[in-house]
Image (cartoon, rainbow, N blue to C red):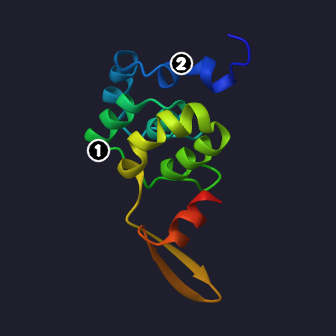
Amino acid sequence: REGMGRMERKFPEFFNDNLKQLENTVRKYGPDYRTEFNLTPLMMATLGGSVKIIHFLLELGAQPDLKDNLGRQAFQIALLKSYQSPQSYGAKVLGKIYHTLQPDSLRLKCKNRLIKLDKHQMEFFMVNYM
């Protein structure tokens, strides 16, 4: 396929929602193993918009609060993908996984103060969206 990225070529199961192809690897290494891109299977499934795989991994105990090299959680990756592809990802995928991946709160340090933003606050959404 033209325009297919390196991750998509290397890990097609995450971009095709192919649970069968991924199941043995996850059962062998666990739901939170890291790929050579330092992404967990949950992050990869989020990038690929693979709703079935996301739910499967969470049932196996995958931790949605783990971060990649850029400090992003799966929830933040989903928000980024919906911004990049609003018609395909934002409209078709985000609604199915938003509440599943959404953390309860976010803690920030600002001017030597720890601030907690709960998920119902608009600031929570804005900080995660940035």
Q: Position of residue 104 (x, y in %)?
A: 37, 65
Residue at x-position 60% and y-position 56%: 71
How far from the left and from the top, in percent, is residue 99?
37, 51
Q: Is residue 57 left or right of residue 14?
A: left
| Quadrant, the C terminus | bottom right
Location of residue 56 in the rendering, given as x and y in whole percent from the top left corner: 30, 33
Question: Which residue occupies 64% across, 36% down?
Answer: 85
Q: Nearer the viewer, residue 85 or 39?
A: 85
Q: Secondary structure at mark 1?
A: loop
Q: Residue furthest left?
A: 59
Left or right of residue 75: residue 24: left
Compared to residue 92, the image places residue 16 above or below, namely above
The residue shown at (53%, 63%) is: 125
- Considering the numbered disc 2 on the image, is that residue within a helix, a strand or a loop? helix
Residue that numbered label 1 is attached to: 61
Observer able to see residue 36? no
Q: Nearer the viewer, mark 2 or mark 1?
A: 2
Category of crowding for the residue at label 1, using alpha-carbon neighbours closer than 10 angstroms: few (below 14), some (14–19), many (at least 20):
few
Rendered position, 74 above or below 86: below
Residue picked out by circle 2: 12
Whether residue 90 is situated above or below residue 14 in the rendered picture: below
Image quarter in which the N terminus is found: top right
120 on left or right of 11: left
